[in-house]
Image: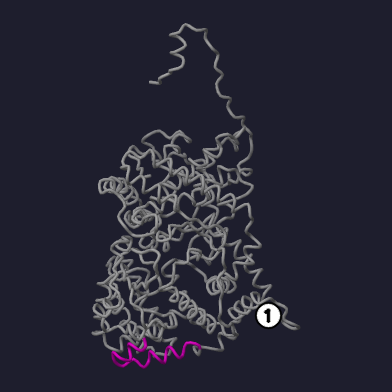
Amino acid sequence: MKHRLVPSLLTALALPSLAIAAPKAPAEKRVSLTDVGLDGKAFDTSVKPCDDFYKFACGSWLQSTPVPSDRSSWTRSFSEIDKQNENDLRAILEGMKPPAKGRDKRTAIARKLGDFYASCMDESAIEAAGTTPIQPLLTTVAGVQDLASLQAALVTLAQSGISAPIRFGSEQNPKQATQVILGVDQGGLGLPDRDYYLKDDAKSVELRGKYQAHVERMLVLAGRSAEAAQADAARVLALETALAKVSKSRVERRDPEAMYNKIDRPGLLQHAPNYPWRQLFGALGKAELVDVDVSSVPFLEGMDAQLRETPPEAWRAYLTFKVVAGTAHLLGKAFVDESFALGKALTGQKELPLRWKRCIDATDGALGELLAQPYVARRFAGSSKKATESMVAEISRAFAAGLARLEWMDEPTRAKAHEKLKAFAFHIGYPVRWKSYDWTVTGSYAANALASRRFELARDLAKIGMPVDRQEWEMTPPTVNAYYNPPKNEMVFPAGILQPPFYNPKASLAVNMGGMGMVVGHELTHGFDDEGSKFAADGNLQSWWAPETREKFESRTQCLVDQYGSYEPLPGVRLNGKLTLGENIADLGGVKLAFEAYRAMRQSAPERLVADGYSEDQQFFLAVAQAWCTNTLEERARMLANVDPHSPPRFRVNGSLSNQPAFWEAFQCAEGTPMHPANACTVW
């Protein structure tokens, strides 16, 4: 019942009735879907929006858009932008290649970029070099005869960026976020995940067989006889299986508290006394290093047991394969093709990308922030940055308003959540300070790539003991992606993603908020998902929640675990609701926040755009869906269901929208329809 206080007062005082004008409804402007930035040809109107909104918004696109032969999936947003970026970067790099004759008038940046790209494109020189660029590493491995020579080989390989069976690098101390320390992590596996070694279903057994055959062929390319390679491949698989058995699962790795084990240098020597820690730190210029965090003490102990118990011939085979597998893309066609053979088995991709595409990726990997400078000048408009800043501000306000409405959160925890929100940092487009790349580019592609690895390793380790650089980026600006970093409590939106259809200056606000706004809301929500919520405003891993409030939060997130755990991307293959929980929370929050922010930004608009009959609210949700229209090969879909913390696009759309009351209202979905379940999930 509505309590109409003012009319009641007028009646009681017997005053003359007053004619109170209703607020004037905004005018409607009729436009087309194309005008607002949507693709009406992508729709499948034979499907009801309340039955399967993803298929309604994307169905015709899915039917008419095959996966290119050099890809294992294709997305209407990410892939199309990436294709455009590839062409931009190709034009940039082709224009920077060494002149065929005459004076070299290139700038220093152009010369370094052009020479690196040219060395990658010079296939004849790469073929002629054979295995010469990696021969010193292969010779070192061939000398493994006992524990001492194995230790020496591990140090030499680590210096060249081949750090199996462990990975290491700088990290912010999760408990003291202003401090940079060494992080040591599990590694050493050639298949995408430990479960590939441990599961006994038919597909896993089949893939292990293909993997062992691949290892065998790689060892033959490295110079082993066919008979020796066959025996060695079995040894490699056995050693990797032993490492897999002591590796944490992907779900276990999502617990930041369990991943934090600051045992420092004495702990390394205690739990893995056979690994050459002293020699490694000395060789890397960190002889006095003390502070160390490890992701898994049991892995260290299990790895150490293998150092002690596995025969030298098995370690020779394993490290030989790691050298070749880690450098195959730097070598001749036979190595490249065999490396691709494994990827083909895992993802179903039919063809290797053209050489120029691979060389663009290689240049971005080695000299990313040099390549970013001409890219930003060409592709990143200032309006994109201003628009994203507006989105961040409005979405932050929407989250703050939502915090005030949460009945399950106690006041002290709510206050700390507001504190964390206010402390959020965000970076848009490109860094305020470009990285330098102080290493020499030569005519040898493999030598250049290995020099880049050594330089980046030294750059990374130099951070240890220094103040955290809060301006450093973890992605290059042309990258079509975005991220949230809990220890820095920051969101980063590279120029690469601020392109149509995520952000289009010509699109309507509703469409841009459904595209890029959802991305902004997604990353902000990561600060409060099941992992991010364990980090405080200053980036420290600490408990800032009242226990009762945390329990209520986890009961709400369990709803998402159950919901997404019921989805089947392939017959008989279910998603892991625990593995995808953080991304599902972020998707759910991202859509909700972006919608509320869009509504606030359009509140005083004098007119509403109606696009081929679709209201602005409907345009928003259509934009959310069309950003994720994706075709994926079966093999890749199967792999991602095992290893990807993101749900497949269909479920990212339908899963998040089916929990949104605003979506139900926009498309008039009755309760009980697939897109309006009776027991919808809500977190933030």
Q: Position of residue 363 (x, y in %)?
A: 57, 73
- The quarter of the image holding the N terminus is top left
Q: In the figure, 52 relative to 82: above or below?
A: above
Residue beneath disc 1 = 98
The magenta region covers: 133-153
* Residue 204 horizontal side relative to residue 92, left or right: left
Image quarter in which the C terminus is found? top left
Please tell me whether residue 562 belongs to the stretch shown in magenta: no
Residue 405, picture quadrant:
top left
Residue 466 or residue 305, whichever sits in front? 466
Q: Residue at x 49, y 48 (%)?
A: 518
Q: Quadrant of residue 257?
A: bottom left
Magenta run includes residue 135? yes
- Who is closer to the viewer here, 374 or 643? 374
Could you say where residue 34 lies in the image, as x and y percent from the top left? 62, 44
Residue at disc 1, secondary structure:
loop
